[in-house]
Image (cartoon, helix red, strand yellow):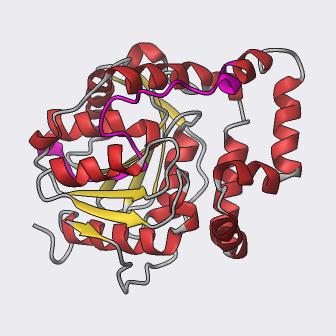
Amino acid sequence: MTCHLALDVRPEPLVLARLEPLVIQTSRGAVEYASTGSGPAVLCLHGAMGGYDQGLLLARTIGAAGYRYIGPSRPGYLRTPLSGGRSPEEQADLYAGLLDALRVERCGVMAVSGGGPSAIHFALRHRDRCWGLVLVSTCADRVDTRPPLSFAIRKLLMRLPGVASAARRKVLDDPESVARRSVTNPDLFDRVRRDADAWALLCELQASTTDRMTRRFRGTDNDVRVSRTCSYPLEQIAVPTLVLHGSADPLLPFEQHGAVFGKRIPRAKLLVLEGGEHAAIFTHRQEARAEVTAFLAANAPGLPGAP
């Protein structure tokens, strides 16, 4: 089912406590994570150049109040070793181990971009522990395009003394020029620039990628490899699923990814963010949050209306 219109739902403001991350030992290895809030658990999975901080930022961008958000650093990011899971299947099992260590029986899963493959496999391999799946701007099949040459050059340069700190100063001092690389549509850029909350979240995302940048490269390299080699038995996903995808996503084109989810996942609901690019949840934050709020409320265990 495809939805092109926003729901008339006004989510409560979501303010998450800023917590220091912890490293916990699980049956599958060490995992860095941060957790905040109370209520039904939602596992928040970041994308490339991410970490636990971007997982919780995803929750602040499109999540609602009344849930416990758990943001792990996926394998290869920050203090979670890549040995914890190179494949999306291994990462899914690592998340199950994290839930065991936290004594969480079931959770919803919210994933953006490079976090999508492991979220899909969590829903497939641990369906009894997953009460809902939200996929944001992520891949439905192999990605054939190569990463831009600029990424490889940047990765090499960032290992030189002083370059990473200079890059961070650039992002903090001139966030508008950096944001224009992610939001190339002038009208959408003006929209997000006028929305104080969405703009602050987008700037925070940009800044976070330059914090301990070299400790985010190993996981990013692994994500690129996964995206170019993996495909998914989407027809076997048996949990309630919501897909959010921009119709003008230049990195993961809608017809090859967003639309495919809507066709192949049984009873999945697809919200098309019209004109949205890869950062569509910032430019279209109001409608994205409304849809996610309704989805969580309808599926989280223990809430009125949930199965």
The percent coordinates of residue 28 (x first, y second) are: 31, 19
| Figure check: 259 above or below 189 | above
- In the depicted structure, whether residue 72 falls above or below residue 290: above
* Residue 12 to residue 276: above or below: below
Q: Residue at x 74, y 15 (%)?
A: 156
Choose between 297 and 26: the one closer to the eye. 297
Instruction: Find the residue positioned furthest to the bottom.
Output: 8
- Is residue 44 found left or right of 13 in the rendered image? left
In this rendering, would 169 be left or right of 204? right
Residue in front for this viewpoint, 227 or 275: 275
Which residue is drawn at the image coordinates 44% and 60% (left, top)? 37
Nearer the observer, 78 or 244 = 244
Quadrant of the image containing the N terminus = bottom left
Count of numbered circles on the image: 0
Residue span colored magenta: 128-152
- In which quadrant will I find the C terminus? bottom left
User: Residue 4, how many percent across, how many down?
Assistant: 34, 73
Please tell me whether residue 133 belongs to the stretch shown in magenta. Answer: yes
> Do we see residue 14 in this rendering?
no
Whether residue 211 sits left or right of residue 68 in the image: it is right
| Residue 157 placement: quadrant | top right
Q: Is residue 17 visible?
A: yes
Q: Does the magenta stretch include residue 244?
A: no
| Residue drawn at 43 percent across, 49 percent down | 137
| Residue 95, percent from left and from top | 32, 33
- Among the 4 quarters of the image, the one containing residue 41: bottom left
Could you say where residue 291 lies in the image, as x and y percent from the top left?
Answer: 35, 71
Q: Quadrant of residue 279?
A: bottom right
